[in-house]
Amino acid sequence: MSFELNISAIAAVASNEKTIGSFKDSVKEGRDAINERKIDSYAQLISSIAGVKLVKGNLPRAVSNQLRKALLEDAGVQEATAKRYVENSAGALRLFSIPTQATPTLVADILASENIDTENKLAKLVSGEGETDAIRALAEKLVGKFTNRKDDDGKKVQGVFKASKLTQADWDEFDDVVRELKAARAAAEDAAIAAALAEEANNALANEVFAA
């Protein structure tokens, strides 16, 4: 079954991008509106390709080329924007259980259920980044981390471990710095407790004076 481009989806993207462009001088004030329009565009596009069978987790080349061409020529978006739309929309099909006959409304509900309300959140999920725990991010920076690779379905899976560039001398210095900072933190906490106790004692004394 050949792919037929949904013209109304492209028209919706064009309309949304035009609205987004109107906020270019007031991005902060229009951030919510921009995100809402972007998600609507993705809902439209994902719905339009929901019936496409992915090839190793990606859209068939003919489909992606057709979609990209329509975004560039008919929706009037820039090359980088078209690339994001195509890759993130394909990634959503790869990651979520989206029915082949899904409407834009259903797709929007699915994205909302996954807490995706911005293009950036969708892009991170599609790329396999997701939300990185702060402690793990620090540990990976110091020690090293696993690379990612794609399986036959195009999904990101754990690859090989890649160590950081830190040497034993770096680790020794790191240990010294941590000990120094932990001691300073402990001293600061003790000082804060002592100050709080002193203030409490002064308040109690003041209360006794006024009560006398």
Image: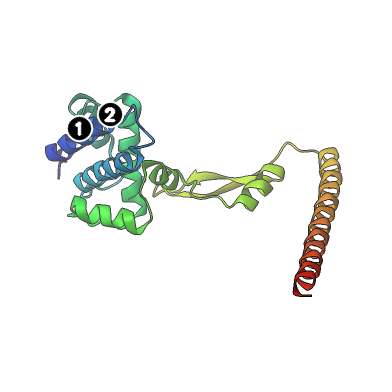
In this view, 37 is above or below 97: above
> What residue sits right under mark 1 in the picture?
14
> Where is residue 179 shown, x and y percent of the image?
85, 50
Q: Nearer the viewer, residue 5 or 74?
A: 74
**Residue 55 visible within the image:** no
Q: Judging from the image, what secondary structure is the residue with disc 2 in?
A: helix
Considering only order in the chain, which callout, 2 or 1, is on the residue closer to the N terminus?
1
Q: Which of marks 1 and 2 is in front?
A: 2
Residue 29 vs 52, above or below: the answer is above
Q: Would residue 211 appear left or right of 169 to someone viewing this image?
A: left
Q: In this view, does 103 lie to the left or right of 20?
A: left
Image location (x, y in percent) of residue 94: 34, 50
Q: Residue at x 15, y 35 (%)?
A: 11
> Label 2 belongs to which residue?
21
Circle 2: residue type: Gly
Q: In this view, does 89 lie above or below 73?
A: below
Q: State the residue in front, 180 or 161.
A: 180
Picture coordinates of residue 65, whole percent (x, y)? 25, 31
